[in-house]
Amino acid sequence: MNNFELAKAHTTAQARELLEEKPNSTFKAGGIDVIDHLKQHLIAPDRLVDLKSISGLDEIDVDRDGTLKIGALVTLARVAAHDGISKDFPALAHACGEAASPQIRNVATIGGNVLQRPRCWYYRLESYKCIKKGGDTCFAIAGMNRYHVLFGGGPAYPPHPSSSAVPFVAYDATFVLEGPEGTRTVPAGKFFALPDVNPERENTLGEGELLTEIRVPSTRGVKSAYAEVRERAGFDWPLASAAVAVEEEGGSVKKARVVLGQVATIPWRATKAEEALVGQPLGAASAEAAGQAAVDGAEPMTNNGYKVDLVTTLVRRVVASLA
């Protein structure tokens, strides 16, 4: 780990000024992923700009119309334990409550979870100059790819690691970004970027921009659920996850959003599974159809074909739980 300066920001404007003031600076919130990057020599900033003292970014609010607003500095533990989120946004509460370990959930922020970098071992090991680090090779293609993607790969193939991003896309959330050009909002479904756009990035966050808030529209009339599978229950990243949100009308599904996690380079909309649900009543038959449709177009790598069955089963179980 290199020597660096720690600068505390008390406003978002000051945070951006501190970043611009010294080239080769990096923002830090909870710091879980940033510290890992420092220890693994993946980054060597001259300054860390600490965001934890910025007031207002650690609040959870629900507007009168049911819109949920979560500040980027809210911890995963607080999201999981919030009564209103558990009641009206259960997929999000479940995803945050399952992430990492209790100790990490008490420190890690929702913004950091959304923005965390891939957990691919080739990316994380300093000795590999992979395509995510400016090289010209994705070593997972011919190497160890047991945990890699079924969808959205090329030229890089690491799974997107964020658990919370999966229900955010399912709920059609919006990310509020503040930067040098002002404030802008981006739908969660358009925020995450495939590696063929830029293999060194996972999202459309601009230079010097901060994720300040996440807004989730009202879920009145929406049924939702989330599930994941891990190798170890205590502390691990999921092998696969799924979030499903549906609206019904006249006993049948009117709208559906099925989003898969850890099986694609971004949170992956399983549109074929959504189509299989629309117009059908929730039940065993539609759950089975959605599960089978969710893996349409999957392209397993040499060692991760088992994820096809995991996704099929997860989607079937999540849809069945909503019946």
Image: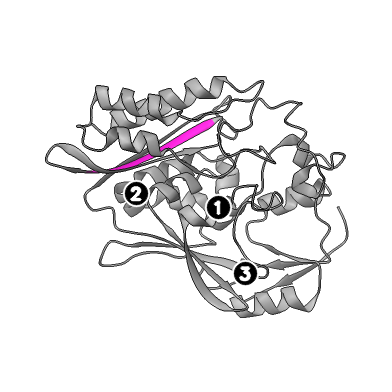
Q: Position of residue 180 (x, y in %)?
A: 63, 78
Query: Upstream in the sequence, badge 3 or badge 1?
Result: 1
Res. 25 mark: none
**Circle 1 SS class:** loop
Identify which amino acid the numbered label 2 is placed on. Phe
Residue 246 colored in magenta in the image: yes
Give amino acid for label 1: Phe
Q: Compare marks 2 and 3 and give the one earlier in the sequence.
A: 2
Instruction: Tell me the number on the disc at residue 192.
Output: 1
Residue 256 drawn at (x, y percent): 31, 42
Residue 311 in view, yes or no? yes
Q: Residue at x 67, y 76 (%)?
A: 16
Residue on which disc 3 sits: 209
Q: Position of residue 95 (x, y in %)?
A: 46, 42
Query: Mark 1: few, some, or many residues within 10 Å (few <14, many ≥20)?
Result: many
SS under mark 3: loop
Which residue is found at the position 47% from the left and 55% from the top? Answer: 188
Of labels 3 and 1, the one closer to you: 1
Residue nearest the viewer, comparing 12 with 137:
137
Label 2, on which residue? 89
Magenta residue span: 240-247
Image quarter of residue 312? top left
Residue 98 lies in the magenta-colored region:
no
Magenta span dominant secondary structure: strand
